[in-house]
Image (spheres, rainbow, N blue to C red):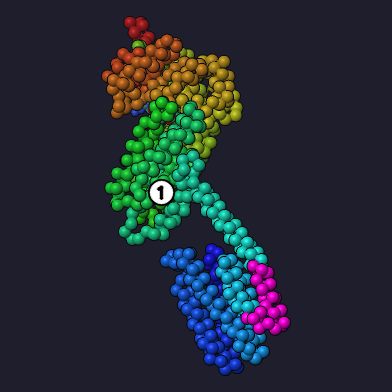
Amino acid sequence: MLVSTLYAQPSSLAIGALATVAAAVVSAWIADLPELYVAAFVLGLIAAARVTAALGMSPDSESSSTASLELVYEIGAFSYALALGCTAAFTIIVNTNTEVEVLMVANAVGYGIGVSARNAGRLTIAIGQLTFTCLPIALAAFWTGKPGFIALGVTILLLIPAMISIAGNIFKVLRDSIASAETSKKLAEKMQVLARTDVVTGLANRAGLNHAMVETMMGVDDDSHLALIWIDLDRFKEVNDLLGHPVGDRVLSEVAKRLSAVSPDGGTVARFGGDEFIVFCPIVDRKDSERLASEIHAEIMRPFRIDGERLEVRASLGVALLPENGTDADTLMQSADLALYHAKVGGRAQTCFYDGSMSRDLVRRREIEDELRAALQRDELSIFFQPIVNLETGRIKTFEALVRWFHPEKGELRPDEFIPVAEETGVIVTLGNWITAQAARIAASWPEDVTIAVNLSPLQIRAPGAALGIKNALREAGLDPRRLELEVTESLFIEDNHATAAFIEELSEIGVRFALDDFGTGYSSLGYINKFPFSKIKVDRSFVSGEQVGKKSEAIIRAVAEMGTTLGMDIVAEGLETIEQVQSVKDAGCNLGQGYYFSRAVPDYLAAMLLTQERDQESRQATG
Ligand code: C2E
Ligand code: CA
Ligand code: CA
């Protein structure tokens, strides 16, 4: 940068050259000395050569190195200064007339002073130029021996140290300001890199991804293909909560490493929020993106080893492609987000590619969201009851209350579709209270030994006054608290929430019982089975009728049943559809069963009828 100041403002250089060449020509004309014509010619020649060199060697061009730029300038500057100084000295020595001497000396000295200030960025050049112009004049002045000239020589010599000090000062100011500009530029660059980097994984963060996407999208042509893969780790919150944040962070870093390794060159890997990642990269075609997505999926599912412990993480992936699913960054992100949402809703641990119908599904979800509140008032919701049967006697022990929504246009909606929406929007609290109240009211009309099970969402339990709501429902229905069973899932215990503990304790005290629902689908940590007073464990139906049912799931049911017997708990097998399944869970030690084999969930009058039939049969058997 210091060298480039030499080349900056070429106009001052041109004015200097013009003035001195003109002065030399005028002097030659007045004095009519051929030597001065030669001098004017030489000065003009050097000036022309310097201008040509300056035009050919810009400090901005890559081909000219700093050292060569400086050297070329130095040679030109010194030869010009020396030529000018000697010309002025010559006018003194040959004793031309005063007019010419003043013209040349003033010009040369003025030039020397001006140029040494101008070129203070390179001190050697500045001082050299001053010395080469002034020294010959001073020597010539002394050589004349005339007092006036001697005084001139002395003052000119004094100029040299004075100018050295001035140029030195300018040089320092220049150097310091360049240095501080460079530091702040470096700092700004560093800050920018930091602002675009995720601290935990070292990947790009949201800002970094945006930047990379903009850059990539600007460079795409008509036949480029890009894939945006949005990855969400399933139930990562549980890893964090159960094993702690440091372990969580290490898992994230490891995932980041694996993603970077499988992503193709020229792609960007970013971490987006807590446990979401994005891979944005060029692909050949759709097939290529499918291969990449499955590779990414396999990489994440590969077990981790952290502190010698084995850890498995699952992930859902949403993929959107350019140009098929969008040609700008925003649309592409929206499409991938929707695809990811579908992957999660569709049972997690899977990959979904965006397609147009997903937007329609989202619309449906929005509609559900909008209509759910009104549905309660419009009486579109009702409660169905599914029997839970004693496997030994075949008698109905409990009915599980399952909510149903009969929508006037959409038909029957499944709770799997609207309960999550109710949870997200908070409607679940009102809805849940209504369900408990209804269920309790109906159960009160059943024989004393039949109990009712109601599902509770974690959000409902954590809501203020939750226990009071249940107590009110029981009182209004006139139902004995011992006939109410609340089904909760493991997800409730992931957060160590004292509201949860207080809720369970307060209701247990009055006799309400608790069942652990969907056992085996979550983290299945047995700690809370010990900690909370569960009277029942419901083994998830994936162990009974899922695809992977086999020796392993049978062994798990057996172990859970054994534990249940030891702890005095009931063990329910869910999802029994065939007699073989009933037989096998019974053999494994479950004492209760639930499933289509016995009955689907039915409306209240049918539930009552099932109970009446059962009792009629029994009394007939008893009377023989
Ligand atoms: P869940 O608590 O595990 O309920 C059992 C689900 O399995 C019910 O589905 C039931 O109809 C179904 N099922 C029962 N036997 C069989 C069988 O033999 N085979 C098969 N394939 N399925 C069987 P449903 O009624 O669609 O409920 C789904 C989930 O929605 C429930 O799972 C529960 O988590 C939630 N849910 C239902 N009603 C309520 C409610 O009133 N409150 C809350 N918070 N959640 C509810
Ligand atoms: Ca349940
Ligand atoms: Ca269940």
Image spot of residue 65 (x, y percent): 45, 64
The residue to which callout 1 is attached is 268
Residue type of the residue flagged with mark 1 = Thr
User: What is the x, y in percent for residue 405?
Assistant: 44, 35
Q: Is residue 560 above or below residue 225?
A: above
Residue 498 image offset from top left, x and y in percent = 57, 24
Q: Is residue 591 visible?
A: no
**Membership of 127 in magenta stretch:** no
Q: Which residue is painted at 33% across and 61% down in the image? A: 222
Quarter of the rendered image showing ligand 1: top left
Q: Residue at x 34, y 47 (%)?
A: 264
Residue 114 vs residue 385, the one in the foreground: 114
Q: Nearer the viewer, residue 261 or 48?
A: 48
Bounds of the magenta segment: 140-164
> In the image, 50: left or right of 582?
right
Asked if 493 appears above or below 3 in the picture, the reply is: above
Taking depth in this image into account, of 385 and 338 the one nearest to the observer is: 338
Asked if residue 75 lies left or right of residue 288, the reply is right
**Left or right of residue 279: residue 162:** right
Residue at image position (67%, 76%) is: 156
Q: Which residue is rendered at x = 51% and y = 75% of the image? A: 76
Quarter of the rendering occupied by the N terminus: bottom right
Query: Residue 177's spot in the image, x, y percent?
Result: 61, 60
